[in-house]
Amino acid sequence: MTAISDFAVKQDAYNTQIGTAVDDIATQITNLNTEIATLQNSPGTITPEDQATLDRLHAAGQALATKVQALDTLTPPPPPTA
């Protein structure tokens, strides 16, 4: 193998890793949005169970933001233009 093909193999693995992470984050966001819609469509006042769900959704949203920020730090910046 040449240095270029070695690099390509490593980069393919890296791209797969990032793709998996992005897919997982997208699924989590979809799930959170579904739960939020369910809460928005519930009639009446907020129950203790609703508040617990809101608290859990808030924590999950913060965790997702942290994951996205961590993912962003893994992505190399674009190469400088000549």
Image (cartoon, rainbow, N blue to C red):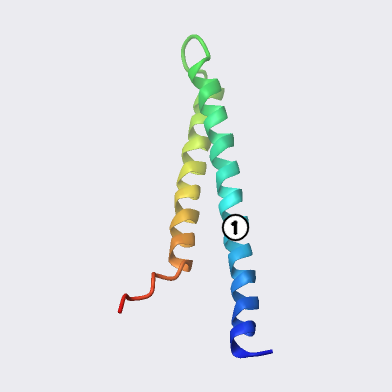
Which residue is the extreme one toward the bottom?
2
Which residue is the extreme one toward the left?
82
How packed mark 1 is, by other alpha carbons closer than 10 Å (few <14, some 14-19, many 20 or more), is: few
Q: Is residue 13 above or below residue 7?
A: above
Q: What element carries label 1?
A: helix
Percent position of residue 81, x then y: 31, 75
User: Splitting the image into 4 quarters, where does residue 27 fall?
Assistant: top right
Total labels: the figure holds 1
Q: Can residue 74 be seen in this snapshot? A: yes
Percent position of residue 19, x then y: 59, 57
Q: What residue type is labelled 1?
A: Gly
- Check the picture and name the quadrant holding the N terminus: bottom right
In this rendered view, identify the residue nearer to me: 65 or 1.
1
Q: Is residue 76 above or below residue 55?
A: below
Which residue is the extreme one toward the top?
44
- Residue drawn at point x = 47 percent, y = 61 percent: 70
Percent position of residue 82, x then y: 30, 79
Q: Is residue 51 above or below residue 61?
A: above
Q: Can residue 52 be seen in this snapshot? A: no
Whether residue 39 sits left or right of residue 2 in the image: it is left
- Residue drawn at point x = 52 percent, y = 43 percent: 60
Percent position of residue 12, x then y: 63, 70
Which residue is the extreme one toward the front?
82
Location of mark 1 (residue) = 19
- Residue drawn at point x = 46 percent, y = 38 percent: 58
In this rendered view, identify the residue nearer to me: 65 or 72.
72
